[in-house]
Image: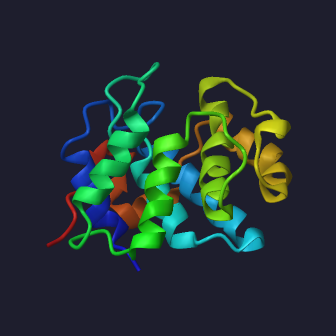
């Protein structure tokens, strides 16, 4: 099991955008929740999907078109292998590919990569886009579309997950992970 709080602290120590922006912490938390639900019925690797939620937008330099940000996020995950990221080569390759290709509109891939992409696409409501069913990879994501879109549109803050990460939105604080 990975220490998401420590990983988040490492990401945020170098994150260049607003932490609560469209591609920030609230988005990552909803993507993680979406991904966990998708893995329940697809058999996708939940650890890879959770790490994808944290890393896929972690190296954005703007909130608009940012070509290469997925690759940069995957490469950042690679820089943390052995310290905070503990996946064997095959599982890490899935994470890296999911990050690298997540904005390319693909739908065919390994089931774990598909779960990653769907978890992210289900959160498009945060930028006023209704995900299109034909661009979702899994039946599980299609079944979650209405639920996830409502949460994304309202910029739902997953309280228990954010608390576990040390994020206190009420006070606007992001707590440093404990050593």
Q: Is residue 111 left or right of residue 82?
A: right
Give percent across and percent down for residue 155.
58, 37
Q: Is residue 15 left or right of residue 66?
A: left
Q: Where is the C terminus found, in terms of image quarters?
A: bottom left
Relative to 64, say whether 93 is above or below: below
Give percent across and percent down for residue 48.
50, 66
Q: Is residue 84 left or right of residue 32?
A: left
Identified at 23% across, 73% down, the residue is: 82
Considering every residue shown, the one lying at the far top of the view is: 64
Give percent across and percent down for residue 145.
80, 45
Identified at 73% across, 39% down, the residue is: 149
Q: Is residue 58 left or right of residue 150?
A: left
The answer to whether residue 73 of the structure is visible from this angle is yes
Which of the 4 quarters of the picture holds residue 1? bottom left
Of residues 41 and 150, the one nearer the viewer is: 41
Of residues 34 and 177, the one nearer the viewer is: 34
Identified at 31% across, 30% down, the residue is: 17
The answer to whether residue 58 of the structure is visible from this angle is no
Relative to 130, say whether 70 is above or below: below
Of residues 97 and 33, the one nearer the viewer is: 97
Give percent across and percent down for residue 165.
36, 62
């Amino acid at each position: 099991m990975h220490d998401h709080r420590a990983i988040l602290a490492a990401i945020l120590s170098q994150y260049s955008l607003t932490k609560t922006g469209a591609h920030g912490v609230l988005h990552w938390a909803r993507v993680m929740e979406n991904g966990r639900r998708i893995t329940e019925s697809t058999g996708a690797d939940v650890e890879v999907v959770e790490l994808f939620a944290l890393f896929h937008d972690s190296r954005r330099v703007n909130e608009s078109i940012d070509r290469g940000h997925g690759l940069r996020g995957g490469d950042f995950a690679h820089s943390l292998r052995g310290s905070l990221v503990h996946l064997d080569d095959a599982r890490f390759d899935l994470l890296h590919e999911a990050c690298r290709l997540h904005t390319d509109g693909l739908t065919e891939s390994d089931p774990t990569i598909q779960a990653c992409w769907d978890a992210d696409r289900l959160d498009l409501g945060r930028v006023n886009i209704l995900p299109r069913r034909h661009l979702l990879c899994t039946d599980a994501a299609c079944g979650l579309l209405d639920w996830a879109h409502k949460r994304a549109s309202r910029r739902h803050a997953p309280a228990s997950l954010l608390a576990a990460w040390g994020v206190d939105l009420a006070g606007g604080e992001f707590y440093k992970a404990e050593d």
